[in-house]
Amino acid sequence: MAYANITVSEKNKTAILAYALTDARGEYKLQLASPLDSVVLKVSHIGHSRSSKKIVNKSQVIDFELEKSTLQLNEVTIDGKSSVLQTGDTIRYKVDSFKKNDDRTIADVLEKLPGIEVESNGRILYQGKAIQKYYIEGLDLLEGRYNLANSNLPVDAVSQVQVLENHQPIQLLDSLIFSDRASLNIKLKNNSAFALESQLGVGLAPALWNANITPMLFTKKRQLIASYQSNNTGHDVSKQLRRLTIDELSNGLHTTSENWLDIQTIAPPPFSEIFWLTNSIHMGTVNYLNTLGDNYNIKYNIDFVTDDQTRSGSTETSFFTPTDTITINEIKHNSLSNTTLRGNVTLEKNDRKHYLKNQLRFKKHWNTKNQQLITTRNQTTQDYVSPLTSLENKFRYLFPSAKKILSLKSYVSYFSNDQSLVVNPGQFEDLLNNSQPFDEVNQRLQHDRFFTDNSLNATFGVGRFTFSSQTGFSIGHDQLSSALIISDSSTSTVLSNEFQNNLTFNKSQAYIQTDAEFASEGWVFKVKLPLKYHFIEYRDENLTTSPGIKRPTFEPRLSIYKKLNTYWRVNISGQLKYDFGQISQQYRGYILTGYRTTQKNNSDLLITKRQVYTAGLEFKDVLNSTFGNVNYYFTLGERNLIPFQLISNTGITETQTFNIDNTIQSHHFNMKVDKTLDFIKSNIALQSTYNQTKSKQFLNDQVYQVTNESISLKPTLFTDISKWITTEYKGSFTLFSNQVGTKKLRQIVTQSHSLNLILFLSDFQIFEINGEYFTNNFSTTPESYFLNLSYQYTLQKSKIDLELKWNNILNTKSYNTIYSNPYTYISNTYEVRPSQLIFNIKFGIR
């Protein structure tokens, strides 16, 4: 029988391990490289019944005999209008079914897809969980910085957005290690595509500019996204370069410095930055992938950003204790400047036989901040400088050996950070200068870190079980030096050892971990059994310090996944974790962390024992475009230390830690439902979250139980009222409350509503009205309104968009926000951008 389909897969799994077609004589041959003991061989042919056999994984000849049958299509819908389709573990969204006439980039469409959520920073969630990989035509060009593609890739060039459920990105582990995480793949309409997206804009009040030139190339062997963007219209284009996937975020943990020092900035409002960000930014990036022979590819990612911002407004801070309320008022004028140069080179090979990835990254960052501050006490100037240099290399190699898959991993990183905070006039006279005033205080701080983690792992399968054994070690070395200098008109004095740090902090561990996984009939059980031995020591040349600790920990984790049927699946997990203190919790000399805050530590090493339990339920009906998920997280933490906050009547805060046991409980619940209603051409979603945290706080010599609670509800609606009118609505309702001891504090209620009305006057004219409303029950001026208009005319032959935007028509001057922590309310009044008119011309070559 000619042209019969022959596939090999693992039992109870849909992933195809090998594939072949029979020739004209009905003969076939296929090869498989897999450590599985047995596999399932399946044969299918149109007009005949399917046949399958479970066979031992060895060289052999297998014959099949098929019977003729009538093919029934009871469970298959063939409909050119179907917008969402599923094949195996892949969900395909037809972009043209969700695209509107005003959509220009793929980011405009993603947030309308059921089951997919796009957060304000651009991070993509599927069924409430962050995606792990973002591919374009199956290639990971951007290494987690996919917002660059989302914001610039033309929607007209994309045919599908694919969600790869249970995606295992390492092909060699695909049939061995189960993954509960999803990835995203962008399918283009053409196998080879070139696009040049450009935008130029000018505006008034004040003089405004906006520029974007982004060439893109996608072929089977090469991919390129380069971009130069600049504006002063309130668009933070540097967000397009942030790492958003979990793996890429965790890669940079050891090259991110502590925020030792800072100035008191004004927290930005929780709405579009075009209303409040006063900026002048230039960004350049080049991202290039070249596919080499033998399944190798090499990637280059280089970025440069320089950004100057100003922020003005006022802050009212209330410190609540069970016996008193302390309130301070500040008027702030901030100037912020950030310059960053970074890049990485990645060599990768990923096929069924080998996996290799080596990634070298570097970063140079210059950060300066200046603040003019007016309080009821005096006028203060603050200057902050923080240059950072970092370098890291990550290596991983997997290869089969004697029916096992061996894995070598190595991570090495180093950074150096020099920070300085100068405050004028001097603060903390009682603490620093025998109650005598002085002109200036200068906090100098240098932090260097070296870290490496290396391991060897062996993975093998036995029937339906998969076992992994990992052995490794990590070494961390931190060096902290700091000094406080006070000055007056004639002299400068370096304060005594009590105000200095010369701390060496070494934190290393040896570990061995055994993992086991069992999969059968929709069930997946995963057990992780890590045993670690921790070596921590720290010493200060100026002060007496503790010798540290040497102790083992056992941190097991159990996860259970069950696919109940086509629509439902459930997961639960439990984990025990130990966290040991960082250098930021162990210095003994005072550090001036802000103009009215000092910190030091005079206690043992912080040890946190955490129990983490999760449960989740997912629903998915692809045929009816309905998605839903419910997730619950419970964390029980036990700490041996408690922070001590001493707050004066002027808001001056001194922070220390004491050896008092502290238990922290937190509950987190979230729910979301997405539904596409084809009969009214609408996408509707409802999301709700609940959070509660209980912990102890040491306030002004007394220990109190502090409870925080928040509830939020977020509805969204995209609907086509008619062919000519589309509406988009987003809402948010949040209730926050907290309690210190037996004292219940005032509840904070906030609301936000955004409504877009889009009128398609013709095939080449679009008129858009956007209104936004914000309110809270705490501020003296609780309500804020914003109204924006835009008109777009498209030259159809050249496909050039001419756009006129009028933002903040009502010329709203300020916005009030409320923030809270366990014992503090912070009310910010933020000066927003004035009414402004911008003309943009957008054109592209595709």
Image (cartoon, rainbow, N blue to C red):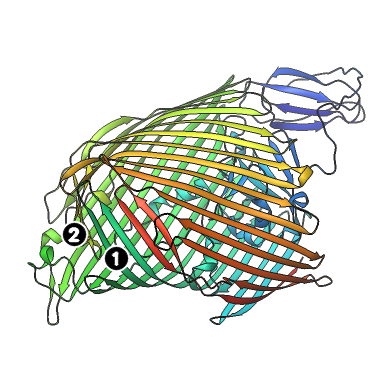
Judge the density around disc 2: few (<14), some (14-19), many (≥20) Cα neighbours within 10 Å: few
- Rendered image: mark on residue 649: 2
Amino acid type at image mark 2: Asn
Q: Is residue 373 left or right of residue 108?
A: left
- Residue shown at the point (58%, 34%) measured from the top left: 173
Q: Position of residue 830 (x, y in %)?
A: 42, 67
Tell me the SS state at disc 1.
strand
Tell me the SS state at disc 2.
loop
- Residue shown at the point (83%, 21%) measured from the top left: 50
- Label 1 to label 2, Cα distance in Å? 12 Å
Q: Residue furthest left?
A: 434
**Which quarter of the figure is the N terminus placed in?**
top right
- Residue shown at the point (73%, 65%) measured from the top left: 195
- Rendered image: mark on residue 654: none
From the viewer's side, name the closer residue of 85 and 188: 85
Q: Position of residue 700 (x, y in %)?
A: 17, 49
Judge the density around disc 1: few (<14), some (14-19), many (≥20) Cα neighbours within 10 Å: some
Is residue 746 among what the camera can see?
yes
Dot placed on the residue nearer the N-terminal end, 1 or 2: 1
From the viewer's side, name the closer residue of 208 and 88: 208
Is residue 104 among what the camera can see?
no
Contact flag, marks 1 and 2 (Cβ < 8 Å) = no
Q: Position of residue 314 (x, y in %)?
A: 36, 68
**Which quarter of the figure is the C terminus placed in?**
bottom right
Give the quadrant of residue 54: top right
Q: Position of residue 746 (x, y in %)?
A: 35, 48
Amino acid type at image mark 1: Asn
From the viewer's side, name the closer residue of 36 and 684: 684
- Residue shown at the point (48%, 57%) measured from the top left: 775
Q: Which residue is mark 1?
A: 329
Q: Is residue 574 left or right of residue 72?
A: left
Give the quadrant of residue 725: bottom right
